[in-house]
Amino acid sequence: MLLLIRGFIYRLIFTAINFLVSLLIAKLAGAGQFGSLSLMIVNAAAFHILTGLGTDAAIVWHGLSEKKFNPNKVFSFTIGSAALQLLIFMAVAGLFFYITGRSLLSGNKNTDIFFAELIYFTGLVLTDKFISLYYSQQLAAFCNKLLAVASLVLFAVLVAGWLGSLIPVKNNPVWVFSFFVFIPALLLLIYYLVKYHPVPARFSRQELKSFLSFSSIVFLTNLVQFVAYRADYWFIDVLHDKKDVGIYAQAARFAQLLWILPGIAAGLVIPALKNEKQKLSNEEFAGLCRLVFYSHLVFAVVAVAAAYLIYSFILPQEYFSGFSALLIMLPGYIFFTITTMIAAWFSANRLLKINLSGSFICCAVILLLDWLLIPSYNYKGAAIANLVSYSITTFFFIFMASKSAHAGLKDFFVIRFADFKLFSKKVLLQQNAAEA
């Protein structure tokens, strides 16, 4: 539990700094440029899922099974899958730019942006692959510490450069954001090579089959989830304009603050559930889920107040119309924190088809509601679709958990005094001694 908490705190710092960078860009670049940047991020994530084939999750799961897969084999799979992704992206992006004269991710005609997108996508792939590699070797705390420190230093340089007019953030939002992603990713790669001296290792046919069979289901799940979470951006872009995309994207970023903590916890829970030395029990996991849910009820109030102040005093006035959309979608995001945690439990226990089924349900509902509501209600329609689809999906996951993990509604919503002992000084000291 102590390692989980350490990793959680460092990853929270890293994510928070990334949010501040996007907020600075939104303020300086305006809704139009921020909308284009948001589309680049969305399209990069889509291409990452399509070419990644679920290998990130396979790296974590197989790396934790160290009796069958040694670190050198996991490293080889990591490097190989990353190289394949980057080669595919470079080929497709280059061909697309040659034929259309536009960059693949943002549709920009500027050659400069084309290269910035290459840098961004490379950083995105390396970050996800090496986070998975570090997690698979039970190095989550150190990995997130390295990311947190690197992003903090970069943010300080960015702010100093902006205040001193040395870094033109307003005119180069894509380059600024791209390097902010690429540099920490490069540090993860360099440190692992220098510290652990990995050597290439061959796979048997059976080992490769195990990697690919795990990856295939995760790939389908990620693809369906992505369509569910990001289709609204595309609907708004096609039916309205990029300014509306920028307004909605900023509102969604405020709502997604509620997913930062459970998202980080879910990523750390899988190694914790499979760690034989300091294994997280199912009872502790259920308690963690309850604490995540109720803490986010409180956090939602803070997030709304902070968003209102930022809308009022920091962001340009054009963004404020998205505040009502934020209020509409927020309850769905709160419920979905439970889904994020349960999905991690299913993944750790290789019940991947349940995650896939839940993703299909979420995707079907949100696409239907986006199609019905966005044409007339714009981003408020997208917010309603989020509220309904995320709520329905959460109760599906709870229903499946009641069958697979023997945990019902009360196990996820009825708080217990013992839950708070998970983070008591006595428990943490005992676990720290055990780890030593």
Image: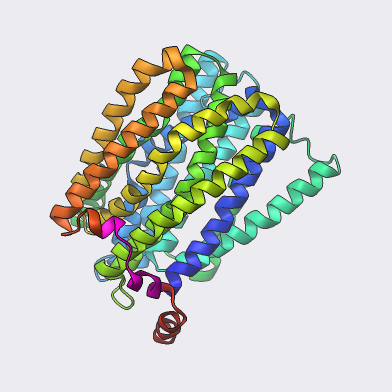
Magenta stretch contains residue 20: no
**Where is residue 421 shown, x and y percent of the image?**
39, 75
**Residue 142 visible in the picture:** yes
Q: Nearer the viewer, residue 52 or 32?
A: 32
Q: Is residue 161 left or right of residue 33?
A: right
- The residues colored magenta run 411-422
85 in relation to 292, above or below:
above
Q: Nearer the viewer, residue 208 or 43?
A: 43
Quarter-wise, where is residue 361 in the image? top left
28 in relation to 67, above or below:
above
**Residue 192 visible in the picture:** no
Residue at point 50% right, 18% down?
237
Residue at point 38% right, 49% down?
337
**Where is residue 425 shown, x and y percent of the image?**
47, 81
Magenta stretch contains residue 415: yes
Which quadrant is home to the N terminus?
Answer: bottom left
Q: Main secondary structure of the magenta part?
A: helix
Which quadrant is home to the C terminus?
Answer: bottom left
Residue at point 36% right, 54% down?
77
